Amino acid sequence: MKKSAKELREQLQAACEDELPEFIRICGQDERESVRKLAETAKKRLAALERERERIGKLREYERRYEELAFICGVDEVGRGPLAGPVVAGAVILPRGCEILYINDSKKLSEKKREELYRVIEREAVACAVGSATAERIDEINILQATYEAMREAIGKLTPQPDILLNDAVTIPGVEIPQVPIIKGDAKSISIGAASIFAKVTRDRMMTEYDREYPEYGFAANKGYGSAAHIAALKEYGPTPIHRRSFIKNFVEAE
C-alpha cells in the first residue's frame, strides 16, 4: 500500500541526508503531483547541503594552511560593547578535517542555531573552553586588557594545549603559542567561528541568569547592550553590580 502524501512529507522531514537519494528516486516516479513535488523539495535540500559543504570547505582555508600542526585553536570573544555583564572568550580545537555544517560568525546565526551548534561543538571538539572578565575587572584594567585576560584564561584551560592560535583580529599579549590574527576571522575560519559560537552561547546564558537577579533591566533580551529599554531602566533604577561603570557615564552618575 502506497504511503499518503502526508506520510511521505513527514518521512522527508525526518529523513537524514543518506536517505534523500532513494526518497527522490521513489517519489519522482510517483503519478501523484503532490508526491513528485516532495521529490523536488528533497532535491533542493540536497543541493543546499552541497552548497553548505562548499562554504565550510572555504572556511577551512586557514586550518589547511597549518594542517601539519596537530592542534589548531580558534579564539574569539563576545561582549566588548555591552553596558553590563562580562566579556567572554572562547577557545576551540576542532578535529583535523572537521566539517561541522553551519558554523559561522555567531552574530549571523539565530539563537536556536547557536544552541544547536554549541552542543555539536562541545561533543565533537578535541577541546573547548571559555574565559571571562567581570564588569568590575573591565573597569579596573579597561575592556581591551580584560578581553586579553579572558582569552588567556580560555586558552589556559585547554587540554591538550594548542600548537597555534587563530585569533579574530587580535594578537594576545602574554601568550607564547604562535598566533595568527585574522580580520573578520569568525567568518573566515571554522575554528574561530566555533569559538565565537561557544563564547556567545556561554555569555547569553550568563545574561539570562542575571535577568532573574535583576529583572528590571531586560538582560535576557538585550544581553547587556544599550537598548532603549535598558537605558531607561538604568536611569530609573541606577546601575547594578554587573554594570560597567566606565561604560555608563553618559547615562547615569556611576558611584
Image: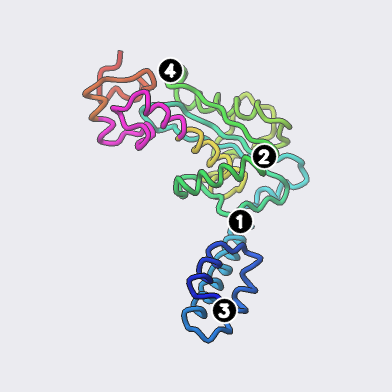
Quadrant into which the C terminus falls: top left
Q: Which residues are magenta?
A: 205-231
Q: On the image, numbered disc 3 is attached to which residue?
A: 2
Q: Residue at x 48, y 35 (%)?
A: 78
For this rendering, which residue is in front, 173 or 85? 85
x and y, in percent, of residue 110 in the image: 45, 49
Give the amino acid type for the residue marked by disc 2 in the picture: Ile
Circle nearer the N terminus (4, 3):
3
Q: Secondary structure at mark 3?
A: loop
222 magenta-colored: yes
Circle nearer the N terminus (2, 3):
3
Q: Is residue 218 above or below residue 253?
A: below
Q: Is residue 63 above or below residue 129?
A: below
x and y, in percent, of residue 128 in the image: 64, 35
Q: On the image, numbered disc 4 is attached to which residue?
A: 136
Q: Main secondary structure of the magenta part?
A: helix
Q: On the image, numbered disc 2 is attached to which residue?
A: 93
Circle nearer the N terminus (4, 1):
1
For this rendering, which residue is in front, 253 or 121? 121
Q: On the image, numbered disc 1 is attached to which residue?
A: 56
Give the amino acid type for the residue marked by disc 1 in the picture: Ile
Q: CA distance from mark 2 to mark 3?
A: 48 Å
Q: CA distance from mark 4 to mark 2?
A: 30 Å
Coloration of the structure image: rainbow
x and y, in percent, of residue 116 in the image: 54, 46
Q: CA distance from mark 3 to mark 1?
A: 39 Å
